[in-house]
Image: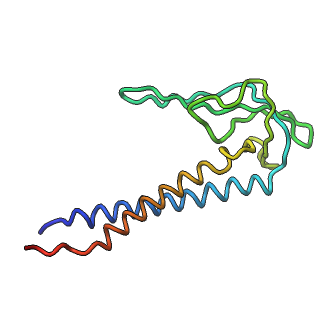
């Protein structure tokens, strides 16, 4: 029994593509829910939460902005933005426009193109490449032997 490498690769890439589609849908739902159903206010970046994602040969830190703001009910909140990056895009002390969940004010998202749409774009590219190449491998005809 021989294993058809192209078929196995096709199945794996198709699964990766489907996982990216599901992730894209989830991130889109979450981001747009906060954007359309959340409360809009201004916050101040007070610090960064650093997550060390060190690898064997190189270190890679991810920085998540810590935002302080006041809800529409006058409650002071300190929350961590859900989107991080390898650099600190906002200066400590800078004002940012945010959306927060009214019933869970710890759920915040900074209103910016990067925070709202970059994860969706990245997952969509992964879905397109993974699913596309996966389907190409699955649909590839067996090469005739000579």
Q: Residue at x 52, y 28 (%)?
A: 61
State the residue in front, 4 or 141: 141
Q: Residue at x 59, y 49 (%)?
A: 119
Scheme by which the image is coloured: rainbow
Q: Position of residue 139 (x, y in %)?
A: 32, 74
Q: Is residue 116 above or below residue 138?
A: above
Q: Is residue 67 above or below residue 72?
A: above
Q: Residue at x 67, y 44 (%)?
A: 115
Q: Quadrant of residue 23?
A: bottom right
Q: Quadrant of the N terminus?
A: bottom left
Q: Position of residue 96 (x, y in %)?
A: 79, 36
Horizontal side of residue 146 vs 5, given as left or right: left
Q: Position of residue 79 (x, y in %)?
A: 73, 35
Horizontal side of residue 118 vs 113, given as left or right: left
Q: Quadrant of residue 73?
A: top right
Horizontal side of residue 76 vs 67, given as left or right: right
Q: Quadrant of residue 57?
A: top left
> What is the total number of numbered labels drawn onto the structure image?
0
State the residue in front, 128 or 46: 128
State the residue in front, 88 or 44: 88
Q: Is residue 20 above or below residue 74?
A: below
Q: Residue furthest front?
A: 146
Q: Position of residue 6 (x, y in %)?
A: 25, 64
Q: Residue at x 31, y 67 (%)?
A: 137
Q: Quadrant of the C terminus?
A: bottom left
């Amino acid at each position: 029994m021989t294993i058809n490498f192209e078929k196995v690769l096709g199945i794996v890439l198709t699964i990766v593509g489907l996982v990216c589609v599901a992730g894209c849908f989830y991130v889109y739902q979450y981001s747009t829910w906060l954007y359309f159903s959340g409360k809009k206010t201004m916050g101040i970046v007070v610090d960064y939460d650093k997550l060390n994602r060190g690898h064997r040969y190189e270190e890679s830190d991810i920085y998540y902005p810590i935002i302080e703001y006041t809800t529409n009910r006058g409650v002071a909140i300190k929350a961590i933005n859900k989107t991080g990056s390898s650099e600190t895009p906002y200066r400590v002390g800078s004002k940012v426009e945010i959306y927060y969940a009214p019933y869970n004010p710890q759920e915040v998202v900074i209103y910016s193109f990067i925070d709202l749409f970059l994860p969706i774009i990245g997952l969509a590219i992964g879905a397109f490449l993974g699913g596309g190449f996966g389907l190409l491998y699955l649909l590839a005809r067996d090469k005739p032997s000579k």
